[in-house]
Image (spheres, rainbow, N blue to C red):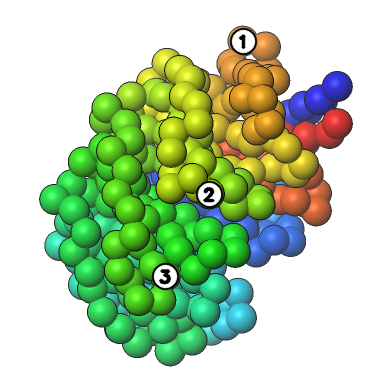
Amino acid sequence: MLQVEKLFQVAAHSGSIYSIISNREEFVYTGGSDGVVLKWNIKSPDSATAVAKVSGQIFSLYLFQPLNQLWVGTMSGAVHVLDLNLKKEIHYFINHTASVFDIQLSSDEKIFIASKDGSISIWEAATSQFIQSIHIADGGLRKISFHPTRNEMAIGSSDNSIYIFSADSYELINKIDAHSNSIFSLCYSMDGTELFSGGRDAMLYCWDVLNNYHELKKLPAHLYTINDIVLLSGNLMATAGRDKHVKIWNTENSELIKVLDKEKFEGHKNSVNKLCWLNEQKILLSVSDDRSMIAWKISE
């Protein structure tokens, strides 16, 4: 029987929180509409520290742990690279002409940035050197997910499609006409046999990776946009929605196990925008338009 305990709810931002990233230990970083990056210690969450203030809203964060550098993507398309050891900004790029929605790291340590301008840009993580840009779609690009074993990546677009690209040659492998509206979230299963997607149509899809990404199943998972999907331990998965809910699913049979809402669990009172799973602590973090972060202890 799955047990969920709300450990704490904290608020230090002055606006909506759009992004969260962890160092896989006790520290997490959040950013949002106030343009501030906050550092939190999960063991003492009441004392958040501001590590940066940038111009404009923060939509995406990525922590490159080998160098302790935080990449910050903004609404304007600018990217800031912060050296957390030196406590200062060391790089500033304006490569994109519109919002930076996602920043991810490939297995060969290249930074991939997805933008509303329909392109991705690729950078050397160790040196922050620009490699190239690739225009992918006329719609904005919301999410990048790397396959756990294959050298390929899935990119979700506002043109309702999922693009499957080679992660080394950057060639298009497949295009999936997926949702009836913008795709906001993508996540491969741990074994890489399935790809989960969610978007503005509130539908959760499962795609058969081994069968040319054929549709396996779909279900109306939330009332409004599915903003994020993350894998938890075992066969568990969590989704975050604009309907203010965090939902826990069984990936094997698509069974809905828990709905973490305001009424029963004292959850968020506005859209839940991003999730972060701390595997060692078995804690799921959720951030919201209500300016708060909630920590959920998940135990089976």
Mark 2 lies on residue = 210
The kind of residue on which mark 2 rests is: Leu
Could you tell me residue 242's position as x and y percent?
41, 26
Closer mark to the observer between disc 1 and disc 2: 2
Packing grade of label 1 (10 A; few <14, some 14-19, many >=20) is few
Disc marking residue 167: 3
Dot placed on the residue nearer the N-terminal end, 3 or 2:
3
Left or right of 204 in this view: 10:
right
Question: Does residue 101 appear in this view?
Answer: no
Mark 1 lies on residue = 263
Left or right of 194 in this view: 117:
left
The kind of residue on which mark 3 rests is: Ala
Could you tell me residue 109's position as x and y percent?
51, 78
> Can you say whether 207 is above or below 222 in the image?
below
Real-space Cα separation, disc 3 to disc 2, in angstroms:
17 Å
Describe the element under mark 1 as helix, strand or loop: helix
The kind of residue on which mark 1 rests is: Glu
Residue at (71% x, 50% y) in the render: 278
